Structures are given as structure tokens and as C-alpha cells.
Amino acid sequence: MANHYEDEDDTVELDDFQKVSLAKWFLQNAPSEEMQHVAKDVREVLTNDRLYDQAAAEAFPEYNLKEMISLEMPNGTGQVLVSRYGEVDGSHYLDPRTAQVAAVDHVKQICKSVRPASDDELPSNYVEQYRASVDAEVLKYVEEAYPRGSCSVYCTNGKNNHGDGGEFELTVVISTSSFSPKNFRGGRWRSVWTVELNEENESVELRGHIHVNAHYFEEGNVQLATSYECSDSTVMQDVIETGVSIVAVIRHQESEYLAALEDKYSTLSDTTFKELRRKLPVTRTQFSWDNALQLSLSREAARQISMSSRVQSLARVEEV
């Protein structure tokens, strides 16, 4: 009779579509700042450059947009954020601060070239005043709160407003990351603020979305992910004061959330992580650590007595 376990030992060869799908999943779910490390391993596992190139071409753009990475522009004028709010097409991204459009190589994660933005890609002079005011205040805030962070302010609606009493929308994007292999940790902070300015009501409405990821990999692999949404408002004033008040709201909301995160994470070891551990050993009885040394000595003594008894028994047998 044939062994019914034989089929379980047989390996099933994946087809090319399945291999590419799996490779994409690993690439798209790489921890922050670790994409290139994961990509190197994925390439080695696939052992097929054609399949890897296909997976990378699909996964990297999605990953870069999700992570909102920043890339140094080759002309030394600053960094461009890879964000859907500044996306001109799949490989070109607007940097409103310098009024340039950057060409991006997603797989290599570099900026290849830049060109001046066209008039159609930029807001009206009226909207630009407010956008630049908010951008200047956000830049000061990010330099203070996120030393390695990047930010940008886009006009995402009503860019043709010329100050005739209508509405327009700005989107503030902040992205910062930290990666320290020697300390076995990494992570990223991303916040997006939708700012609706209404000249008629002299009001400013803000909606914030914050995403935080952390990765710890010292003798293990733990990833923490959290998100937060909030809303607030302020008064629309002159150009400079409006920029100051908008960023004051952002600063307050993000500081409150960061403080709440620190309180939460400080109690993880006492609450959440303890819940992940078995409360009792398999014996269903607690181990008495106070008597651990005594138990160890008793066990060693019993072992020595047992060995001595065996030796004596063998000696009697030999005498007989």
C-alpha cells in the first residue's frame, strides 16, 4: 500500500505570476527605511532578474507614495516629497517650494532631474501667498520638532482663486523617519493636514491624519502601527497671521498625540506585552523562583545518588 504521507513531502513549484505576487507583497510591506534591504533579499530568493524587475516596477512606486519618502534634487535646491498630492504623473512630482517638477526613479529611489513647473501646475498668485506663508511656518516647525523631517504644502483645490471671495484648499504633508541598524530599530511619522480656507466666512477648517510605524528587530521582529484622525479650526486673517495660526493648530494637535503615544508605549511592557505571554507554564502551576537554587541542588543530589547506586549494583554483579 502506498504511503499516504508521500504527497505531503512533495514541493509545489510556483508559477511566475505567483512568484511576482509574493515578491510584491514582501516589497510593499517592507518596514520604513528598509526597502532596499528587503529588495536585496527578495532578488536573491527569486533568482530571476526578470521576475524581480517586474515585481519591483510595480511595488516600489506604491511603497514610495505610501511612505512619502523625500529625495534630494540633483541641482541642490532641496528635497522633493514623493506624494500623491504633488503627483504630476507616475514618475514626476511637484515641489511647490521651488516651483519645480522632479523626475523620480522609483526603484533606485533617486531624483534624476528637475524642470521648472508650468503655470498650469502652479496656483494663482493670490493662493500662492497663503501657500507660501503656511509653508514657511511649517518648515520652521518641522526643523524644530522633526530634525530629519521633510514637509511640503500643496494647493489641492481652488488653485485658480484670485481673491474673489471663494474657497481654496491647501494640504500640508509632513514625513520623517529614523533608522538605526545598530540599535535594531526604525520607524516613520507621516501626517497629512487638509486645510480649507473660506474667505467669505473668514474661517479655516483643518482635518488631520497621522500615521506612525515603528519596527524593533533585536532578537525578534516586532512592528507597531497606529493612526489618528482629528479636526480643528481657526480664523482666516491676513496672509502671515493665517499661516501662523494654521501651524499653531497643527503643532498643538501633533504634540498632544505624541504625548499620548509616549504614555501608551511606556505601559506596553506592563500591559500589552504581558498579555502576549503565557500566564502559566504547561504544568498550570507557577514556578517558585525563590526555591530555584534549592530545587537545582536537590535535583543534582538525586542524580548523584542515583549514579552512585548504579555503580554499586554493577560492582556486586561483577563480584558474583
Image: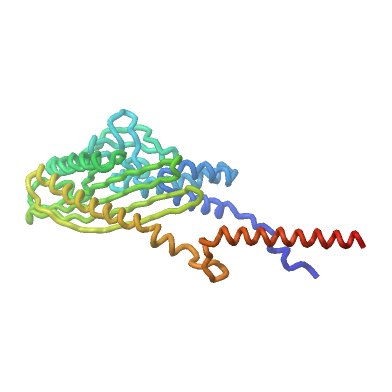
* Residue 92, horizontal then vertical, whole percent: 34, 40
| Count of residue discs | 0
**Camera-nearest residue between 292 and 31:** 292
Quarter of the rendering containing residue 91: top left
Can see residue 293?
yes
Task: Report whether 24 appears left or right of 249.
Answer: right
Task: Report whether 189 appears left or right of 244.
Answer: right
Looking at the picture, the colour scheme in use is: rainbow
In the image, residue 129 above or below residue 74: below
Residue at the image point whose x is 38% and y is 55% from the top? 225
Quarter of the rendering containing residue 86: top left
* Residue 127, horizontal then vertical, whole percent: 14, 44
**Camera-nearest residue between 80 and 230:** 230
* Residue 178, horizontal then vertical, whole percent: 37, 42
In the image, residue 64 above or below residue 224: above
Task: Report whether 1 appears left or right of 178.
Answer: right
Residue at the image point whose x is 32% and y is 48% from the top? 189
Tell me the quadrant of the picture where the C terminus can be found: bottom right
Tell me the quadrant of the picture where the N terminus can be found: bottom right
Task: Report whether 114 appears left or right of 63.
Answer: left
Residue at the image point whose x is 29% and y is 53% from the top? 210
- In the rendered image, the residue lying farthest to the top is 75
- In the rendered image, the residue lying farthest to the right is 320
Residue at the image point whose x is 34% and y is 34% from the top? 72
* Residue 318, horizontal then vertical, whole percent: 90, 59
Can see residue 120?
no
